[in-house]
Image: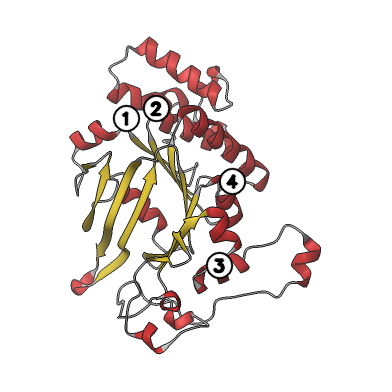
Amino acid sequence: MTPLVVVDQLKKFFPLSRGRQLHAVDGVSLTVHEREIVGLVGESGSGKSTFGKAVVGLHSKTAGQVRYRGAALPQTYSPADFQRNAKTMQMIFQDPYSSLNPRMTVGEIVGEGPKLHSGLSKQDIRDSVAIWLSRVGLEPDHMSRYPHEFSGGQRQRIGIARALILEPEFVVCDEPISALDVSVQAQVVNLLEELQASMGLSLLFIAHDLSMVRYVSNRMAVMYLGGLVEIGPSADVFFNPAHPYTRILIASNPEPDPNYERKRQSTTITGEIPSPINIGPGCRFAGRCPQVMDVCRHTTPALLPLPANPDRQVACHLFG
């Protein structure tokens, strides 16, 4: 497959008082190929959403580079950069309640992209909005209504239509189902899968639900405290995790079978979470890892292919 988006050692630090910095994303490299879905998982605060926003230019990059079809994207986007890249890279946001302007109608929200970037007439934009509302399972006459008149699942469909109406090639889905009822989550995921297949989209799918990520994605990347600890084919990572953090993360995933769930031994991560402000040397998971070694405390492990499986990469001294 041809690389569509290549992220090379991306860093995003947020300045704090007294010269300190919060290391939200610290040297992450990731490749997304054409028509591929890459899942990005990890605990809250691991930097997943910040990474996604930095890739599409909503956050400036402290260091590193993002290349789209081989062309380097700016470290900090200007209005002209957003204008240039809006038709190729878009984002679906996590919260369907706060990501839609309550003062705009659905037609204005979904049609804002074509109005700013396409040069279409008002009638052509209106026709395009009607088509896209139908594609996401809403009625064309909904375009005169306001966001508060819709349920959470319907609002997320509006957000999907807004992101895809410009027909981008790459879309960051920032936890698009986490704020929805369980009964609605599958509907939204099925819609995204259908649109991804029909449009040939490449997706970076950020989520907490590891089972859902394993279901929808081709490859799964695991993020911890600003860095990647493991990446590989989704089924391999889910059913045969290599990094100790990935093992515990997947073991803590609830089982749908209540009989099995009652019998299995629960797994939790112990120890203090390191501060993303003062990150010392060594593996960031060392203070919580059940298999920690002396080398883990003073040497940072590199993300390297497993000897037995080059498609799998793990940042762990157990495999070094």
Question: Which of labels 2 and 4 is toward the front?
Answer: 2
Badge 2 element: loop
The quadrant holding residue 28 is bottom left
Residue located beneath label 2 in the image: 167
Looking at the image, is mark 2 or mark 3 earlier in the sequence? 2
Q: Is residue 204 above or below residue 241?
A: above
Q: Does residue 307 appear anywhere in the picture?
A: yes
Compared with 299, 33 (above or below) is above
Label 3: element kind = helix
Q: Is disc 3 in contact with disc 4, using a CB cutoff of under 8 Å?
A: no
Gap between marks 2 and 4 measured at Cα:
25 Å
Dot 2 or dot 1: first in sequence order is 1
Q: Decide: marks 2, 1 in contact (CB < 8 A)?
A: yes
**Residue plotted at (62% across, 63% down):** 253
Image coords of residue 99 (percent x, y): 43, 41
Residue beneath disc 3: 249
Q: Which residue is mark 1?
A: 87
User: Within 10 angstroms of label 4, few (less than 14), some, or many (20 or more) residues?
Assistant: many
Regarding mark 4 in the picture, which secondary structure is present there? loop
Q: Earlier in the sequence, mark 1 or mark 4?
A: 1
User: Distance of mark 1 from mark 3, alpha carbons?
Assistant: 36 Å
Mark toward the viewer: 1 or 4: 1
Q: In this rendered view, identify the residue nearer to me: 309 or 240.
A: 309
